[in-house]
């Protein structure tokens, strides 16, 4: 990786790692980012409006995986002041580039030297890998044609199915396949709204688009809150893969000290009954 990274490249890299799928519209002011205690005694948690990671309204408000993770850290670190701000992904990247002190609770864990602007905690929990989300009838067709799990490259190479995603979403090792076959073609649709996840799954059910790629709990949340019946298909290129989640903080002296304290608290967080229940609620149905 180059020693200097442009803001544009930073945005693409961070969006790819963020477990959230859409960016919230709430924007914190400069004053709201100022801590009420000395710099070594607080954590500013940045969050996105992206259920079921963070849920801000409805019957499930504050019951998202990352909502409860932050609450568990609050209980495990009672002598630290905790503040939560809902920020668009681009704003989070800009604050990190400017070395503003903040932590993001749900990042994809990467090697220690993978990013210049952030430092990772030890893994907090893990997720199942991405899969194809589509209509049940189309799911039957896809598995008959491309196998179970689905060989994504064979499917994309047919150029027969329309793909939808929240704008800026990145897919790790699948990204090159999407770029080769569907991105920037008539088969590709970007959605920019705050409720992009809900909108794209509704479009799939209405046969306006054919599939997206995401985590199983995106499907579970939609079915629980919006109704409808979707199908989730494992992808052959990701067979057996698990995705480790971690906290990421600004790579500076403050962030290094906070990550040490977060690492010390992780064993207690992992045993927190509320956090265990949340993982069971959202992840257990799709555990292998």
Image (tube, rainbow, N blue to C red):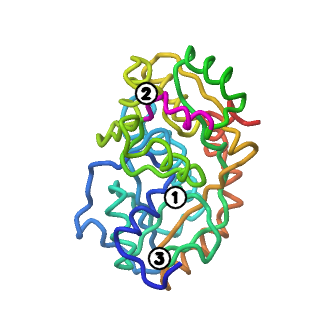
Circles 1 and 2: CB atoms closer than 8 Å: no
The quadrant holding residue 189 is: top left
Q: Is residue 15 left or right of residue 119?
A: left
In this rendered view, identify the residue nearer to me: 148 or 101. 148
Q: Tell me the tag on residue 17.
A: 1
Residue ID at (66%, 42%): 128
Give the residue displayed 39% in from the left and 23% down from the top: 202
Q: Residue at x 42, y 40 (%)?
A: 165
Query: For this rendering, which residue is in front, 158 or 210?
Result: 158
Q: Residue furthest top?
A: 137
Dot 1 falls on a residue whose secondary structure is: helix
Q: Position of residue 207 (x, y in %)?
A: 41, 18
As measured in the structure, the alpha-carbon distance from the residue carrying label 2 to the one carrying label 3 is: 34 Å
Is 111 magenta? The answer is: no
Where disc 3 sits, the SS reads loop
- The residue pinned by badge 3 equals 117
Q: Nearer the viewer, residue 279 or 135?
A: 135
Q: Is residue 156 magenta?
A: yes
Query: Most extreme residue toward the front, as rendered?
Result: 158
Query: What crowding class fits label 3: few (fewer than 14 Cα within 10 Å), some (14-19), or many (20 or more)?
Result: some
Range shown magenta: 154-163
User: In the structure shown, which secondary structural element does the residue marked by tag 2 occupy?
Assistant: helix
In the rendering, which numbered label is found on residue 201?
Answer: 2
């Amino acid at each position: 990786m180059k020693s200097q990274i442009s803001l544009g490249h930073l945005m693409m890299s961070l969006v790819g790692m963020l477990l959230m799928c859409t960016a919230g519209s709430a924007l914190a002011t400069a004053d709201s980012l100022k801590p009420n205690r000395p710099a070594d005694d607080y954590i500013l948690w940045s969050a996105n409006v992206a259920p079921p990671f963070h849920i801000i309204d409805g019957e499930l408000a504050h019951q998202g995986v990352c909502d409860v993770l932050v609450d568990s850290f609050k209980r495990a670190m009672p002598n630290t002041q905790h503040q939560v701000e809902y920020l668009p992904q681009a704003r989070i990247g800009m604050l990190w580039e400017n070395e503003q002190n903040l932590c993001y609770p749900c990042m994809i864990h990467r090697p220690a030297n993978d990013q210049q602007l952030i430092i990772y905690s030890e893994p907090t929990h893990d997720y199942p890998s991405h899969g194809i989300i589509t209509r049940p009838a189309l799911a039957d067709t896809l598995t008959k044609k491309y196998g179970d799990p689905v060989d994504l490259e064979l499917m994309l190479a047919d150029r027969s199915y329309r793909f939808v995603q929240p704008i800026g979403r990145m897919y790790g090792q699948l990204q090159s396949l999407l770029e080769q076959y569907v991105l920037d073609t008539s088969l590709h649709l970007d959605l920019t709204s705050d409720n992009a996840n809900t909108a794209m799954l509704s479009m799939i059910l209405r046969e306006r688009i054919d599939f997206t790629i995401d985590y199983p709990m995106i499907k579970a949340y939609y079915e629980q809150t919006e109704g409808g019946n979707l199908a989730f298909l494992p992808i052959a290129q990701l067979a057996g893969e698990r995705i480790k989640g971690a906290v990421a903080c600004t790579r500076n002296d403050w962030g290094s000290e906070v990550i040490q304290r977060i690492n010390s608290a992780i064993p207690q967080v992992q045993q927190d009954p509320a956090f265990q229940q949340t993982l069971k609620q959202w992840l257990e149905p799709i555990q292998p």
